[in-house]
Image (cartoon, grey):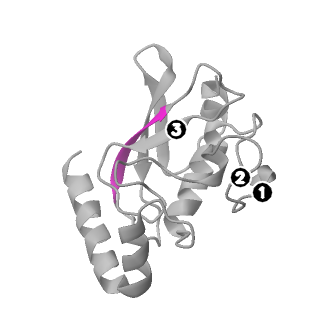
Amino acid sequence: MANVDLQKNPVEGFSAGLVGDNIYEWEILVMGSQDTLYEGGFFKAKLSFPKSYPIDPPTMTFLTEMYHPNVYPDGTVCISILHPPGDDKYGYEQANERWSPVHTVETILLSVISMLSSPNDESPANIEAAKQYRDDYPQFKKKVSRLVRQSAEML
């Protein structure tokens, strides 16, 4: 898969590797980027590739608790490039914003970095987090800070 590309062009703020010898399951460690609410955090995630990859997108799920408007309460990441290819039945995303076989683990990880620094609260996966982000930012920030501290202690 894309492991060779990632070794040649590592993405700052992440480490990634196979789970055992299963090429369809990757372990990801997301290190919270500087100047974001997630700075200093260490968030474990997994990237699961379907047998139909690269036609269909992988799914990325945080295993460490994550509170973010674009991460479902179960940890599943909701970003456009991880949505199935083609037109969005709700008309929110254009086809060129969704999954394409040209995406790599590197482009996925870069998109997650972008998502963490710039949440899209207009199309939330976690409605509670999006509402709190908009309406009570100090409390949102406090909750994220607690999760960042917990994630660093769990390493």
Q: CA distance from mark 1 to mark 3?
A: 19 Å
Residue 37 in view in this figure: no
Proximity of marks 2 and 3: CB atoms separated by less than 8 Å: no
Dot 1 or dot 3: first in sequence order is 3
Residue that label 2 marks: 88
Crowd rating for badge 1 (residues with CA inside 10 Å; few <14, some 14–19, many 20+): few
Residue span colored magenta: 41-47
Amino acid type of the residue tagged 3 in the rendering: Thr
Which residue is drawn at the image coordinates 40% and 16% (left, top)? 20
Amino acid type of the residue tagged 1 in the rendering: Gln
Which residue is drawn at the image coordinates 28% and 81% (left, top)? 139
Q: Secondary structure at mark 2?
A: loop
Amino acid type of the residue tagged 2 in the rendering: Asp
Residue that label 3 marks: 59
Q: Nearer the viewer, mark 2 or mark 1?
A: 2
Which residue is drawn at the image coordinates 61% and 44% (left, top)? 82
Q: Secondary structure at mark 3?
A: strand
Residue that label 1 marks: 94
Does residue 50 belong to the magenta stretch?
A: no
Which residue is drawn at the image coordinates 47% and 72% (left, top)? 35
Q: Tell which of 20 and 89 is nearer to you.
A: 89
Image quarter of residue 115: bottom right
Does residue 43 belong to the magenta stretch?
A: yes
Q: Is residue 132 left or right of residue 9?
A: left
Q: Which quadrant, please, contains the N terminus? A: top right
Residue 85, disc: none
